[in-house]
Amino acid sequence: MRKVLIIEDDISLRENTAEILELSGYEMVTAPNGKIGVEKAKTHLPDIIICDIMMPEMDGYGVLKALSKNETTRHIPFIFLSAKTERSEIRKGMDLGADDYLTKPYEEQELLSALESRLAKAEILNRMAIAKSQITERSHGQMQTLGELKKFFDDHGTIESYENGEELFKEGFRTNAIYLVLKGVVKCYKMDAEGKELITGIYSVNDFLGFTCFTENLPHQETATVVEDTKVATIPKATLLDLLQKNHDLALALMGLLNENIGTIKEQLLQMAYSSVRKKTARTLLQFSEILNKKSNEPIHISRSDLSSVAGIATESLIRTLTSFRREGLIKIEGRNIRILKLDQLQKII
């Protein structure tokens, strides 16, 4: 059962909102002001937070700032619920990192749809961050497996922490380090002539990266940026080269890993080059439909920006594609809602 924290000083609105969500199958936690809300968020770790803006003790903006600084709460989806309807206030809330903004009075279905949408997006992004493969280790010799190499990084490497958005290294610059991800997720990418990101790899816990030729200090051919708070262990390239020279089985195991990575990168680049916007849009619609557990012809309440960010395409391109799907009778667009009319035909697109 998904847990929702409501932070609202108006007791009637707080109780009414909690009752609506409880009847819809959510577990409820409530707080009468921002200060208590922050403490309950840290204690109960809800799946999503709904928060008023104007409150005693601490306003909604202060709540969001406080939770964003805390490691255990910073990734919880956050929705503002407020009577403030000025565009500047809405923009302020979104700039601080809120996931959505609902204005009072709200429709019951609007509230439920906003929760479903944000929870679905969070689950999709979490799935994308999970490591998709494990490396098989062999069991003989002194240091001949990648597992033993990872232990060496843990025991002898320099541990460094990076916040979401920080770069480990940048295309064209030199670093004298090889990285092992201990926590978090890192994306590597190149920029094309039009300034568009071409992602060459996603790395999570226990993945190595930074293998620009370690016999020479050559500049990196890609940029590595963390997409959530990340911790890495690093060792100098010279140290790794010395290990490989002394442990031939380890060198062969690492060569196998690099070979596998090259094949994966090629496949990713081919998909990026040839997978059409139609396929990406259809695939993302089907993902949201699956996560939200919607049956064919049931509406999906999801913002265009969320669809485009998960699909990895420009919002304008996504909107044009949705319009094309609507004209073909595959979907029906009803405000922010999208209703899939022909599920089987969308599946055929991908």
Image: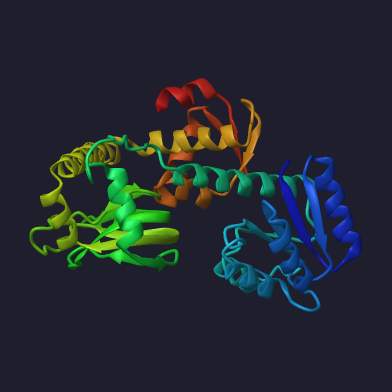
Along the line of sight, which residue is nearer the eye, 2 or 56?
Answer: 2
Residue at the spot x=27%, y=53% of the render?
Answer: 209
Residue 177 appears at what percent x and percent y? 23, 63
Is 139 in front, or is 339?
Answer: 139
Q: Residue at x 62, y 36 (%)?
A: 292
Position above or below: 329 against 63? above
Tell me where residue 92 appears, x and y as whole percent.
60, 72
Direction left: furthest residue: 216
Q: Position of residue 19 (x, y in %)?
A: 87, 49
Relative side of 9 to 333, left or right: right
Asked if residue 336 can be seen in this view, the reply is no
Seen at 52% across and 32% down, the residue is 286
Query: Toward which corner of the image does residue 288 lie, by quadrant?
Result: top right
Q: Quadrant of residue 184?
A: bottom left
- The quarter holding residue 272 reads top left
Residue 88: tell me if it is visible. Answer: yes
- Residue 168, x across and y down, in percent: 31, 64
Q: Residue furthest bottom?
A: 57
Q: Residue furthest right?
A: 12
Q: How is the structure coloured here?
A: rainbow
Q: Quadrant of the C terminus?
A: top left
Question: How many numbered discs sit on the rendered protein?
Answer: 0
Image height check: is 339 above or below 219? above
- Identify the residue at horizontal 63%, vertical 27% (top origin): 297
Q: Looking at the figure, which quarter contains the N terminus?
A: top right
Residue sitting nearer the eye, 16 or 164: 164
